Image: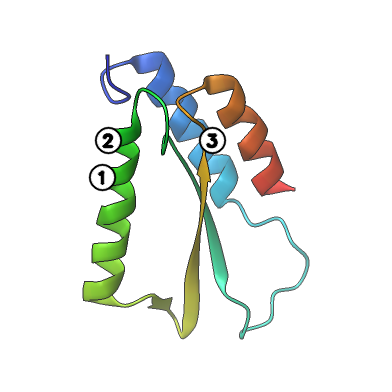
Amino acid sequence: MNTLTNPKRRNTMLAALALAGTIAAGPVLAADPIKVGLILPLSGPFTSTGKQIETAIKVFQEQHGDTVAGRKVEIVLKDDGGSAEVTKRLAQELVV
């Protein structure tokens, strides 16, 4: 079952992405890049899904640029290997 058809896996991934995307830093300077954490299965049983998402992000940034409101958007990729436990740990690391 792939990530999108497995509801438990999909919900875990969505929750991890939401946590990873949260910026909980102090004051942000305008020159600082916007960091977006993305946890993907770049190894393990769901590798093809993770690689497709990674490629889609790169293509989007090539076509539309990697800046928003004058600030560079930096994608921080983390590999969970298709494991929900690793996803949880990585999401906590990205938030901290």
In contact (CB < 8 Å): disc 2 and disc 3: no
Give the residue displayed 43% in from the left and 24% down from the top. 11
- The first of marks 1 and 3 along the sequence is 3
From this view, report whether residue 66 is shown above or below residue 49.
below
Q: Which picture quadrant has residue 61?
A: bottom left
Q: Residue furthest right?
A: 26
Residue holding disc 1: 52
Give the residue displayed 66% in from the left and 31% down from the top. 89
For the residue carrying disc 3, how many other residues have a C-alpha within 10 Å: few (<14), some (14-19), or many (20+)? many
Residue 5 horizontal side relative to residue 85, left or right: left
Q: Position of residue 74 (x, y in %)?
A: 50, 67
Give the Cα distance between marks 2 and 1. Answer: 6 Å
Q: Position of residue 53 (x, y in %)?
A: 30, 46
In contact (CB < 8 Å): disc 2 and disc 1: yes
Residue holding disc 3: 16
Residue 38 horizontal side relative to residue 22, left or right: left
Residue 65 horizontal side relative to residue 96, left or right: left
Give the residue displayed 42% in from the left and 15% down from the top. 8
Q: Position of residue 45 (x, y in %)?
A: 36, 22
Colour scheme employed for the rendering of this structure: rainbow
Q: Amino acid at mark 1?
A: Gln
Image quadrant for the N terminus? top left
Q: Amino acid at mark 2?
A: Ser
Q: Nearer the viewer, mark 2 or mark 3?
A: 2
Residue holding disc 2: 48
Give the Cα distance between marks 2 and 3. Answer: 19 Å
Give the Cα distance between marks 1 and 3. Answer: 18 Å
For the residue carrying disc 2, how many other residues have a C-alpha within 10 Å: few (<14), some (14-19), or many (20+)? some
Secondary structure category for the residue under label 1: helix
